[in-house]
Image (cartoon, rainbow, N blue to C red):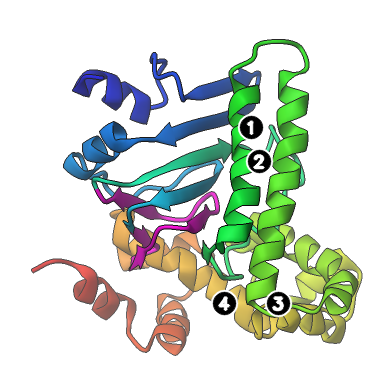
Amino acid sequence: MDTASFAGFLDNSNHDLQTHALLNAGSESFEFFEIDAQMAWYLTQHVSQPHRHRYQEIIWIRQGAAEHLLDGESAGIAAGSLLVVPKGRMHRFIPSPDLTGCVLRFNDEFLPNSSLLLFSQFVGLTDIPVSAEDAAVLEGYFALIGSESQRSDCCQGSTIRHLLRALLARIEGLRLRLIIMQPQALSHSQSLWERFNGLLEENFKSQHAVSYYCGQLGCSPRKLNAAIKLFTGLTSADLIDRRLILEAKRLILFSGLTIKEVAFELGFEEHSYFSKVFRKFTGQTPSAFKESRTPA
């Protein structure tokens, strides 16, 4: 495939790559494609700028390696790993020339109520090492989804949704196993955590008080703290501040806004208070953080 076709592919344009499948039905969107040597080579030669998606993304690395930049932090990813990239996070994926794997992308309309635990902005891991035994199971799911994506009938979207939900449940199980989450504790608190997480994503720029979230969720601060600590080790107040700082870092590094404009965008009436909160969690002022991450 020539450079123009690859560029069209990366821009989600139509193309003739056989391993790619794109479903668009109204506002619903689902995409599946394989990364082969040809695509990997192209991506290493045409490195994109850090960017954010409006969809959830899962990348399966069969062989080779990759450099993954996520919200300004870079890490090397080895073969036999899954990358979970929640929508809205700034990222850049640079594969090695020999990388092979596949990618799944879908928006909220295609799979409503997809796991807020798996795609949380806070709960690691975003890269999940996979054993050979688990890899064989995952390959089965990817093969079924890839095969179903090539069909064009009235049941296609429904079948893919069922397969995708099963795959996400499997991946979530792998990650919970890595962070040693007890099933009993999980079952009692997951619902509250997911409701809080969704509410926070919708309101973190305008609502900074724990009392607002407790009121919306109909629970006490103590109960909310207990659920949040189970998944993050943080208090609800700290988590709200960390979500703000996470977004602040993205805006400072990638938006072109001034520090004062970033503070206003995130609902801080006083620029000085924004700087105080930012320094508490990063050890730097916003200006110093920007200077430290800007190439000389």
Q: Nearer the viewer, residue 157 or 201?
A: 157
Residue 115 appears anywhere in the view: no
Q: Quadrant of residue 145?
A: top right
In magenta segment, residue 76: yes
Q: Tell me the CA gap for discs 4 and 3.
A: 16 Å
Name the residue rendered at 49%, 49% in the picture: 60
Q: Earlier in the sequence, mark 2 or mark 3?
A: 2
Seen in the image, is 123 located left or right of residue 20? Answer: right
Q: Which mark is residue 198?
A: none
Task: Give the residues drawn in magenta, as a range.
Answer: 67-96
Q: Earlier in the sequence, mark 4 or mark 3?
A: 3
Across and down, in percent, residue 253 comes to 30, 62
Instruction: Identify residue type, mark 2.
Output: Tyr
Q: Nearer the viewer, residue 189 or 20?
A: 20
Name the main secondary structure of what is drawn in magenta: strand
Q: Which mark is residue 241?
A: 4
Across and down, in percent, residue 260 comes to 36, 67
Q: Which residue is mark 2?
A: 141
Q: Which residue is mark 3?
A: 231
Label 4 Cα crowd, 10 Å radius (few <14 / some 14-19 / many 20+)? some
Q: Tell me the CA gap for discs 4 and 1.
A: 39 Å
Q: Tell me the CA gap for discs 3 and 1.
A: 30 Å
Q: Which residue is mark 1?
A: 145
Label 2 Cα crowd, 10 Å radius (few <14 / some 14-19 / many 20+)? some
Does the residue at mark 1 contact the one at mark 2 (Cβ under 8 Å)?
Answer: yes
Q: Quadrant of residue 66?
A: bottom left
Instruction: Identify residue type, mark 1.
Output: Ile
* Quarter containing the N terminus: top left
Q: Earlier in the sequence, mark 4 or mark 2?
A: 2
Instruction: Identify residue type, mark 3.
Output: Phe
